[in-house]
Amino acid sequence: MRSSEFSRWNDNDWLAPLCERQLIPADCIGALVVGSAARGWLNPRSDIDLYLVTTEEVSSDTGTLIPMSLNPPRVQSESFYYGGRRWEVTYWLERQVEQVLARVSWEEFGGETPAGFALGEREELLLARLGNCVPVLGADWVEEIQARLRDSAFRSFLVTRSLSSSDDAVEDAMGQLESGDLDSATLSARRALGFAVDALLESHGEYGSNIPKWRPQRLRAAQPDLLSFDQYWELETMRTYDAEDPGAWIRTILTLCQDISMRVEVS
Amino acid sequence: MTAEPIARALTPAHTPSRSLGVRIRRTRDGLLLGLEGDALLLSDSAEFIYRQLDGRTSITDLARRLSTEYLIDEHEAAVDTIELLDQLGELGLVQW
C-alpha cells in the first residue's frame, strides 16, 4: 500500500473500525483489504473495500444481500462511514471461495466451452482482488489461496476471453475499413486496443479488466516489455489520429493487437 | 493460384507484412494462426520469419536473419523464406 493516509496503517488499524462495529465474526479466517486501497490507487472519493472470509454464513439486519451464482447464492455486505470515507465489507464463505476456484480449474479450461468461463462479474472480481489484496487477518490462508490461484487456469481464461473480444473488434474494424466506414472502424479499433491491452495485463497477473478505469494503473504496475506506458497512452488518447486519414491510426492499432496476440501465451 | 507462380512473383526486394485480422494464439506448442475453421501451427523457423513481417523488412534481410539464427547458408535461407511466404500468401496470412 503506498501514497495514501493508510500507507502506515498496521493490521490493527484496519481491524479496529470493524471491531468497534462488531463486524468481525468469531469464525473469520481472513480479512483482506482489496481494490484501490490495497493497490495504493485511492483518490479522495474512493471507498475502502474489505473482504472477510468466514466458515459460517453471516446474518445481519443491517447488511445488503448480493446475489451470486454460488451455493449459497448470495453474499452479505455491510457499509459504514469512517475517517471521511465509505467502507464496504463483503462477507465470503470459505466454501464459496472454493467454488469459485473450482470453476477456473484446468479441467474446466479444457472442457467443452473453454472460453465460456462461468464466473459472474463479482466472482471474477473476487479472484482478481485476491491476487492483489493486503491481508490484515489470516495471512497464511490468503497465501495458500493466492498460490492456488496462480496454479489455476484463471489467467488463461481471462487472456483467452480478452483476445477473443479483441479479435472480434479487429474483424469489425477491418470490415468497416473495407466498406469505407472510417468512423465505425475508429471505434472498433479503440475497442480492440482495450481488449488487447487487457489480455497483455492479464498475462502479467494484472486482473480486473471489468473495471477499465484502472487500466492505466494496471499497465504502470505490470510494465510489460511489449508496450510502454507512453506508447499505450499515445494510442489510448489518440494523439497520432489524423481525421483526414484515420486508416493509418486504425492499422497501427490493429497491428499492435496482432503483436500482443503473438506474444501473450494463452495456456 | 498455385504456389509456383506466386514464388516467381516474389523478389528479394519485396517487404511482406502479416495480414491484419488473422486470429493468432500463442500456446505451449507454438504459434497458431487461424484459418477458416482450422488452424496452422508454425514451426520455430516459420515463426521466426512470421514475427518479423512488418512491411518494412525485405525478403533478403529476412533470409539473412534466418541464416544467422539457424546457421544455414544464405541461399538455402532465401529458398526457405520464399517458400514459406508463398505458402502463407496462398492462405491469405501475409501480403506484400
Image (cartoon, coloured by chain):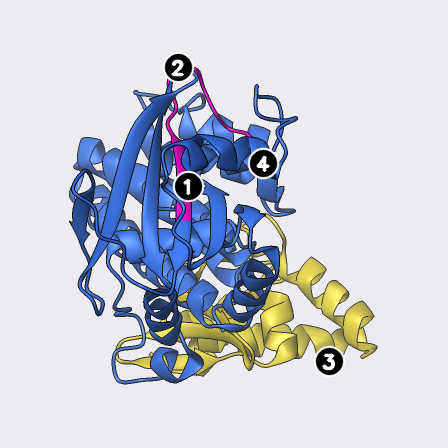
Chain colours: A blue, B yellow
- Chain letter for the residue marked with disc 3 in the picture: B
Three-letter amino acid code of the residue under disc 3: Glu
Q: Do the residues labelled 4 and 2 touch (CB within 8 Å)?
A: no
Where residue B11 sits, quadrant-wise, is bottom right
**Which of disc 1 and disc 4 is earlier in sequence?**
4
Q: Determine which residue is flagged by label 3.
A: B76
| Residue at screen point 40% across, 25% down | A238
| Residue at screen point 51% across, 28% down | A41
**Which of disc 2 and disc 4 is earlier in sequence?**
4
Q: Is residue A17 highlighted in magenta?
A: no
Task: Locate residue A110, reporting x and y percent.
Answer: 37, 83
Task: Specify whether residue A257 is in view.
Answer: no
Q: Are marks 2 and 1 in contact (CB under 8 Å)?
A: no
Task: Locate residue A124, reporting x and y percent.
Answer: 34, 56
Q: Are marks 4 and 1 in contact (CB under 8 Å)?
A: no
> What is the secondary structure assignment of the residue under circle 2?
loop
Q: Is residue A46 highlighted in magenta?
A: yes
Q: Is residue A112 shown left or right of residue A73?
A: right
Gap in angstroms between the C-alphas marked 4 and 3: 69 Å
Magenta region, residue range: A40-51
* Marker disc for residue A50: 1
> What is the secondary structure assignment of the residue under circle 1?
strand
Residue under disc 1 on the same chain as residue under disc 3: no
Q: Determine which residue is flagged by label 4.
A: A12
Gap in angstroms between the C-alphas marked 2 and 1: 16 Å
